[in-house]
Image (cartoon, grey):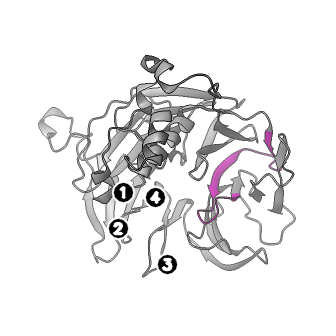
Amino acid sequence: MLGLMAARQAGLDDPARLRRAERTRRVLSLELNKDRDVERIHGSGINTLDIEPVEGRYMLSGGSDGVIVLYDLENLSRKPSYTCKALFTVGRSHPDVHKFSVETVQWYPHDTGMFTSSSFDKTLKIWDTNTLQPADIFHFEGTVYSHRMSPVATKHCLIAGHRQEVLAVSWSPRHEYILATGSADGTVKLWDVRRASGCLSTLDQHNGEKSKASSEAANTAHNGRVNGLCYTNDGLHLLTIGTDERMRLWNSSTGENTLVNYGKVCNESRKGLKFAISCGCNPEFAFVPYGSTIAVYAVFTGELITMLRGHYSTVNCCVFQPHFQELYSGSKDCNILAWIPAPREPVPDDISEKSLPQQHLNPAYEDAWSSSDDEG
């Protein structure tokens, strides 16, 4: 790291390389922050979390009791130990509270003045953050398991939602009209919302080699319910999770299964599973609820890096804060936990870089990218 700083200072290296190396170090050192509490408001399990992308300061949570809470994550007290306070709550006494479990909350991607929520009460609500009143309510015939808004759309403000057996949905961060959905029938479909037919392709775990698969498994992404999916931040790959206890990485352009082996991924959820992918690291990491723990995987190699332990019950969701490489998780134990990078060990003034034990550095800290990669 000292070498990267010296090279950057001398103008000999790309500044992005130092940023990637430091972000990677911070993610690899994530630990439960015992000095930061998130105020406990929910009286039942927490199903969904979302941090607004504008400042990275405000977080929404939705619970099985229908309650929605907004938190301020900033340390206003400037003390080492502090509690992230709830700014407001859409509680059971609120006239527009969801009647049943809130499954998804999401900020409007470009402004903190609006957020959305969907629930098992078959509604999707558009909220005005300032007045805490719904600006619009959409009623559906079936259960809304998940919804998302595109993070990059400039020509539309569509909200993708599904009824009944579609458990997960995600917009491409690369193409504003492309959408991926995961269903209880084991399929993952890619859609172009501009097309009348809609569906572009159905992902096949066997990459077309049907002769090696049973007829039941052909043209499916998983041999169980697909209840979680998430694009990498560059939009080039799609990560999916199924109740067959498998996680798969797909090329989002070709639809090809990259065949990365993540091993057995515990997934007993009967509804949507909210997981997260890091941003700006090399390699990138996936944070996956795994029973009462959170499994951290290297996205492109499948290596299980570590298990984050701290919850007392099943973890339902996690969200990554890319500004400071922090992670927040929600569980059936009604708690939201904050995971932050461990502080860097100070280097004594009398020790030079050449005397440091370089052979003991984690290989994941090394950055093999060149400056040309950032230009492409």
Closer to us: 219 or 75: 75
Query: As shown in the figure, which amino acid type bears the numbered disc 3?
Result: Cys
**Which element is circle 2 on?**
loop
Is residue 39 visible from the viewing direction of this image?
no
Q: Earlier in the sequence, mark 4 or mark 3?
A: 3
Q: Is residue 131 left or right of residue 222?
A: right
Q: Which numbered marker is on residue 175?
A: 2
CA distance separating discs 3 and 1: 19 Å
Contact between marks 4 and 1 (CB within 8 A): the answer is no
The quarter of the picture where residue 314 lies is top right
Select label 3 or label 1 by which is in front: 1
The quarter of the picture where residue 362 lies is top left
Q: Earlier in the sequence, mark 3 or mark 1?
A: 3
Select label 4 or label 3 by which is in front: 3
**Which element is circle 4 on?**
strand
Select label 4 or label 1 by which is in front: 1
Q: Which numbered marker is on residue 169?
A: 4
Q: Earlier in the sequence, mark 4 or mark 2?
A: 4
Select label 2 or label 3 by which is in front: 2
Residue 166 among magenta residues: no
Contact between marks 3 and 1 (CB within 8 A): the answer is no
Q: Which numbered marker is on residue 157?
A: 3
Above/below status of 343 relative to 38: above
Identify the residue position indicated by label 1 in the image. Answer: 235
Magenta residues, as a range?
36-59
CA distance separating discs 4 and 2: 15 Å
Q: Name the residue at 39% across, 46% down.
A: 239
Q: Name the residue at 73% across, 73% down.
A: 129
